[in-house]
Image: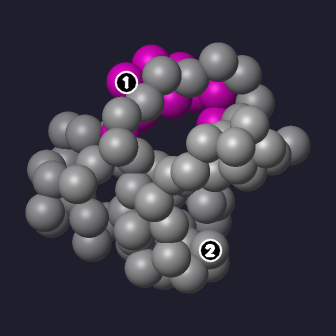
Amino acid sequence: MPTVLQCFEENTIKLPHGCLAGSCGSCRIEILEGFENLSEPSFIENDTIQSLKSQYGNERQIRLSCRAKILGPITFKLLK
Ligand code: FES
């Protein structure tokens, strides 16, 4: 299964990213629909997400596009 980032790159759409390892958070996205259609976050991704939630708020469904694998349809927006 491709990650969100890989899926877009395969279609020549560039998304912001940095480390590709789940630690820098530059590929952060907010999931608007289909949160359940993504793979479970790894320990490193979870740690980064918790740091981002202190900035964006706990109620937002944040994932990292370089780590989240697509299992079904999702809708998301980029987080600045
Ligand atoms: S590119 Fe660094 S966390 Fe995704």
Mark drawn on residue 43: none
**Residue furthest front in the image:** 12
Q: Residue at x 64, y 60 (%)?
A: 67
Residue 47, quarter of picture: bottom left
Answer left or right for 47 relative to 40.
left
Residue of label 2: 20
Q: Are marks 1 and 2 in contact (CB under 8 Å)?
A: no
Instruction: Give percent across and percent down for residue 19.
Output: 56, 81
Could you give the CA–CA distance between mark 1 and mark 2, rounded to whole angstroms?
22 Å
Residue mark closest to the camera, 1 vs 2? 2
Other-residue count near label 2 (Cα within 10 Å), few / some / many at <14 / 14–19 / ≥20: some
Which contiguous range is marked in magenta?
Answer: 30-38
Callout count? 2
Q: Is residue 63 above or below residue 66?
A: above
Q: Is residue 7 above or below residue 5?
A: above
Within 8 Å: ligand 1 and the Cβ of disc 2?
Answer: yes
Answer left or right for 73 relative to 48.
right
Residue of label 1: 32
Answer left or right for 54 relative to 74.
left
Q: Which element type, helix, strand or loop, lies under badge 2?
A: loop
